[in-house]
Image: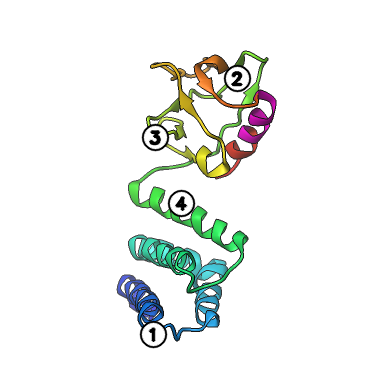
Amino acid sequence: MMSSGYEGVREIEKRLTNTVGWSATSGQVDNWVYEEANTTFIKDEEMLKRLMETNPNSFRKMVQTFLEASGRGYWETSEENLEKLRQLYSEVEDKIEGIDRGTPKSFTALSDSSISFGEGLELASNGIWKNDGEWRLWLRLAGIDLAREGTDVGAAEGEFVALSTLKVGEKEGTLSRMKEVALIQ
């Protein structure tokens, strides 16, 4: 199917979607079917790259279908594998939207009252920290609960945002967790 290029990837995605449909209607699709598909299309780095480059839209649907199969209980897989699928989904979505993630910037704690955000991060209304739309940090997925207290929480390049601007929970623990999240691509 891969010799068919763009259409081949769409066909693979369509068959995976049909497999989830069979699981829903018959309940007769064994776990190994999803595991083999995952091994072939996701765990094989060369194949994964080929699928993503050839037809990113269909590849995104494939990743979404794997996540749906797990979420509905049709496929039992490791949390590590699910995390990889979530990261792939975010990556391919950025590719489709033309977002260049670049090299992540790191958070640096300066004192109890402030934190440096490298090249000027801002808090979007949905709780996502982003840097000029080039990359995203999904803090909520990391279990960090942010709530806006003020109206202006943005930081220009090289400026700082006071912690009092945000409710971040335990300062020390949150800062270290934020550092870890900042390094995730």
**Can you say whether 34 is above or below 116 in the image?**
below
Report how far apart the C-alphas of labels 1 and 2 lie in the structure: 54 Å
Q: In this view, does 71 lie above or below 96?
A: below
Q: Which of marks 1 and 3 is in front?
A: 1
Label 1 and label 4: CA atoms lie apart by 33 Å
Q: Upstream in the sequence, badge 2 or badge 4?
A: 4
Amino acid under disc 3: Asn
Give the magenta range.
171-178
Whether pointer 3 and pointer 4 mark residues with C-beta atoms closer than 8 Å, the reply is: no
> Of 45 and 86, which appears nearest the observer?
86
Q: Which quadrant of the view contains residue 84?
A: bottom right
Residue in the picture at 56% in, 24% down: 118
| Residue position marked by numbered label 1 in the rendering | 26
Residue that badge 4 annotates = 91
Q: Which amino acid does label 4 sit on?
A: Glu
Q: Are marks 2 and 3 in contact (CB under 8 Å)?
A: no
Is 179 placed above or below 141 here?
above
